């Protein structure tokens, strides 16, 4: 990462990451690196507060922020979990269910337009050479929007729209990453929604049933029980991804300062405005000084 000089001006240079690349999420219990390809997939993460969901989300968001072919759409019921990424997001939704519903409807229109384009091309999914941006929709605290605030009908509309996004978005480059700290009821993570997430991550849960609610029924009885993770093992969880069997792994923690550094650089490389000529800057400064 860095900059090059063109015509005497500094131009930001990105790090060359792509959403079609594997994303580093941490290490497994044997110390081996864990990578996943999120393209054509979606990811659901659940666990009690402090279980490490945020570290997983940060790993994905930082990768997406540094990708030239990614656009972030963020839903954050607490403002602060994803707030640091607002400067690199196309859209940031705070604790506002009405705004969340409108934003999901806009993404739904994107799906329709992209599938119309694919149909015209006689194809079923986008590829990297299409040079279409991969839209990464991140929902932090799913339960806030689906079961906590607003009228029941609005919560159900949000859940229905999100389910459509998860079900149809993969092939046209719209990825959903959702997290909740209340994986304790089917009203928050209905099986019909959970089962269409290709990847699932369970941080420490309070019960084996809650663990199964995230990973899928029966995994706890086979030894993949997130309720057995020790409370002090923050960032440790079971990831159900490639291979079809949950893998015990630990996601690396990032400080607020480290996240800020990544986002600042990502925002710099994402600038679309023309870099002003130094002579013009000097002229503006001289005018202000004269005033």
Image (tube, rainbow, N blue to C red):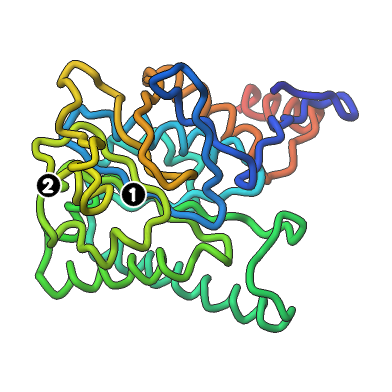
Question: In which quadrant will I find the C terminus?
Answer: top right
Answer with left or right where residue 94 lies relative to residue 10: left
Which badge, 1 or 2, comes first in the chain's sequence?
1
Residue 104 location, x and y as percent? 37, 66
The label shown at residue 272 is none
Q: Does residue 209 appear anywhere in the picture?
A: yes
Mark 1 Cα within 10 Å, few/some/many (few <14, many 20+)?
A: many
| Badge 2 element | helix
| Quarter of the figure with residue 222 | top left
Depth check: give the residue in front, 47 or 93: 47
Q: With respect to residue 179, does 281 lie above or below? A: above
Q: Residue furthest right?
A: 7
Whole-number angstrom distance, CA of label 1 to CA of label 2: 16 Å
Which residue is located at x 70 percent, y 59 percent?
A: 127
Which residue is located at x 64 percent, y 73 percent?
A: 124
Q: Which residue in the structure is indicated by mark 2?
A: 209
| Quarter of the figure with residue 275 | top right
Depth check: give the residue in front, 24 or 191: 191
| Badge 1 element | strand
Depth check: give the residue in front, 220 or 4: 220
Nearest to viewer (mark 1 / mark 2): 2
Mark 2 Cα within 10 Å, few/some/many (few <14, many 20+)?
A: many
Question: In which quadrant will I find the N terminus?
Answer: top right
Q: Does residue 138 appear anywhere in the picture?
A: no
Which residue is located at x 28 percent, y 35 percent?
A: 80
Looking at the image, how many numbered discs can be counted on the residues? 2
Residue 31 location, x and y as percent? 46, 17
Q: Which residue in the structure is indicated by mark 1?
A: 44
Answer with left or right where residue 287 lies relative to residue 149: right
Q: With respect to residue 137, does 59 lie above or below? A: above
Q: With respect to residue 40, does 52 lie above or below? A: above
């Amino acid at each position: 990462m860095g900059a090059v000089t063109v015509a005497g001006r500094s131009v930001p240079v990105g790090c060359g990451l792509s959403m079609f690349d594997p994303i580093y999420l941490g290490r497994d219990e044997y110390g081996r690196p864990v990578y996943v390809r999120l393209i054509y997939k979606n990811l659901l993460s659940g666990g009690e507060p402090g279980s490490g969901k945020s570290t997983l989300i940060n790993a994905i968001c930082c990768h997406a922020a540094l990708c030239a072919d990614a656009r972030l759409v963020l839903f954050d019921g607490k403002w602060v979990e994803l707030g640091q990424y607002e400067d690199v997001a196309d859209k940031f939704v705070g604790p506002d269910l009405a705004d969340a519903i409108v934003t999901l409807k806009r993404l739904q229109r994107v799906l329709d337009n992209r599938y119309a384009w694919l149909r015209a091309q006689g194809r079923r999914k986008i590829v990297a050479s299409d040079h279409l941006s991969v839209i990464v929709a991140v929902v932090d605290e799913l339960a806030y929007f689906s079961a906590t605030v607003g009228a029941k009908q609005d919560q159900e509309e949000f859940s229905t729209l999100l389910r459509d996004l998860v079900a149809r978005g993969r092939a046209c480059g719209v990825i959903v990453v959702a997290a909740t700290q209340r994986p304790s009821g089917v009203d928050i993570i209905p099986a019909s929604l959970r089962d269409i997430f290709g990847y699932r991550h369970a941080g420490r849960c309070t019960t084996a049933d809650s663990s199964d609610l995230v990973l899928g029924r029966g995994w706890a009885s086979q030894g993949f029980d997130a309720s057995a993770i020790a409370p002090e093992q923050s960032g440790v969880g079971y990831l159900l991804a490639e291979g079809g069997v949950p893998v015990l792994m630990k996601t690396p923690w990032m400080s607020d300062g480290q996240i800020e550094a990544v986002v600042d650089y990502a925002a710099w490389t994402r600038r679309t405005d023309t870099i002003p000529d130094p002579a013009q800057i000097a002229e503006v400064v001289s005018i202000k000084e004269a005033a």
